[in-house]
Image: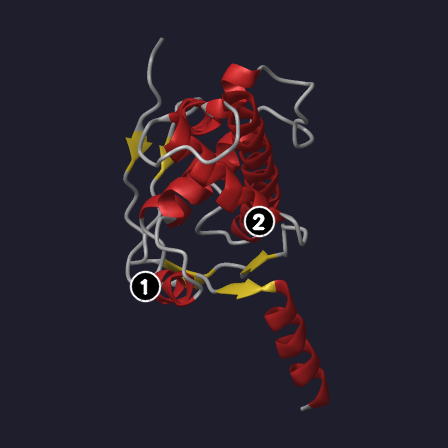
Amino acid sequence: MTLATVDSVVFGTQKWELPPLILHPFSDHSGPGKLVQSSRASLMLNGLLPHDESSEDELTRKLIEGRVCEIRMLFFVGKDLLRWIAQCLDFIGSVAELKNAGIREQSLAEFLVQNPPESVRAKLRGWGVFDYKSIFSRAIGLNSVFCQPPDEGAVSAEFIRNYFRYADHMFACRQQMQSFTEVTTENFDFQIYASGEYSRLLEKSWTE
């Protein structure tokens, strides 16, 4: 198999503002509790924490429930990311200097995961999101395979326990599907918002 290549195109000094990335809430009220229980169960099963009164089967059940919750959350993050990528491609297709430059979905995914604008990274850090590269790449990877977040009965326990490794490879495979032009902060910028925050900004703009 021939790996896709990353093309370098000189865009000059012009800078384009891409559509904002809007992230919506993706967890129910039980999500954080399940994630904590899953993390503790994983540490116990691997001998890194003393076992509590739970049996190994009970710990495995808590681990699986938490991983399913993680998969669901990442899947819905990925929906927002792919929606943003589609909006960016629509914008790029409307700009004469960009529409034939070879900018594809992979270009924008690479931009988002590897080198987003500093303002975006700062905002993510402010939200407590430091490993955004893994979160975004795995979210996109899962959406490359699943049309809906898989429930426990749809995939193997092996996949659920190790979904993050599979998701890493899904993203890598997706990036290698076709050649693409690299885009960087030298010529492109965008902002990131939580959905409620963006709604408030819109409301404010309508009243000014």
Q: Residue at x 54, y 30 (%)?
A: 142
Q: Position of residue 165 (x, y in %)?
A: 40, 25
Q: Please identify the quadrant where the N terminus is shown.
A: top left
Residue 6 visible in image = yes
Which SS class for mark 2? helix
In the image, farthest residue toward the front: 53
Q: Position of residue 75 (x, y in %)?
A: 59, 38
Q: Residue at x 42, y 22 (%)?
A: 173
Q: Which residue is mark 1?
A: 118
- The correct choice, above or below, for 105 with respect to 46 in the image is below
Residue 72, disc: none
Task: Give left or right: position of 198 versus 42.
Answer: right
Label located before the other in sequence (2 or 1): 2
Q: Residue at x 54, y 61 (%)?
A: 20
Foreground: 11 or 179? 179
Q: Which residue is mark 2?
A: 33
Q: Please identify the quadrant where the C terminus is shown.
A: bottom right
Q: Position of residue 181 (x, y in %)?
A: 36, 38
Give the alpha-carbon distance from disc 2 to disc 1, as whole Å: 32 Å
Q: Residue at x 62, y 77 (%)?
A: 201
Foreground: 28 or 120? 28
Which SS class for mark 1? helix
Q: Quadrant of residue 146?
A: top right
How many other residues sit within 10 Å of disc 1, few (<14), some (14-19) or many (≥20)? Answer: few
